[in-house]
Image (cartoon, rainbow, N blue to C red):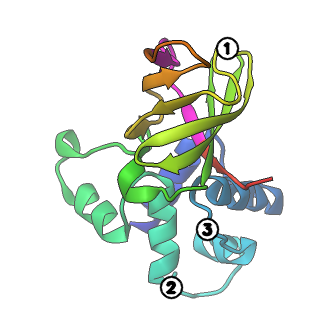
Amino acid sequence: MINLLKNEIETALGMAIRSPKDFDFLRERIYARLHILISRTTLMRVWGYVDEKVTPRQSTLDTLTRFLGYTDWEEYERNASLPKEQQSSPVLSRRLSVLQTMVPGEQLRLAWLPDRVCDIEYQGNLKFLVTASENTRLKPGDTFEVSLIVEGEPLYLDNLRQGNRPPIAYVCGKKSGVRFEYVMPA
């Protein structure tokens, strides 16, 4: 199961994890997505890069499976035990349920093609404030509501308020979907 998990993480990253630099990259990606620090040495042990016969801790396995979009290691094992056609593929559909996951003040970076980037801050009650943006119609100070963000899918904003204009609906990443990551406050 752990080998399957490692393969799925490498697939999600689009690269093999083979060098200390790769483990640093994975560590940074995990922190950007989950705000959880995991040591490079721990990752090296899981991948067998460091020759130590240690079974990964439950918390490490939970973190790695959460990186792929699962709730925890137990959910990952249940999913893997299903027939192939019934398995879900969170690698391709990492999701963020705003009410269940976020607390006011947390920040996300949204990105979509061709070169759109938007930083947002959660205000509570499904409401977000745009704090920075590049190459998008969303501007700092705009607010909107959203309850679910699914990576790789379009993001539907409700009640987008831009200045004194009436609220509208807006779609980010209509063709290619959006990517999201947690951002540390400035």
Find the magenta span and give its range. 170-180
**Left or right: 134 with respect to 129?**
right
From where the camera sits, is residue 157 visible? no
As displayed, is residue 84 above or below residue 118?
A: below
Q: Earlier in the sequence, mark 3 or mark 2?
A: 3
Residue 68 placement (x, y as % from top left) = 47, 52
Q: Amino acid at mark 3?
A: Ile
At 53% across and 22% down in the image, what residue appears? 161
As displayed, is residue 103 above or below residue 180?
A: below
Residue 183 placement (x, y as % from top left) = 69, 50
At 65% across and 86% down in the image, what residue appears? 52
Query: Any mark on residue 55, and which?
Result: 2
Instruction: Determine crowd level at label 3: few under 14, some 14-19, many 20+ residues with C-alpha closer than 10 A.
Output: some
Name the image quarter holding residue 114. top right
For disc 3, the marked residue is: 36
Query: Any mark on residue 114, and which?
Result: 1
From where the camera sits, is residue 111 visible? yes
Q: Earlier in the sequence, mark 2 or mark 1?
A: 2
At 61% across and 27% down in the image, what residue appears? 142
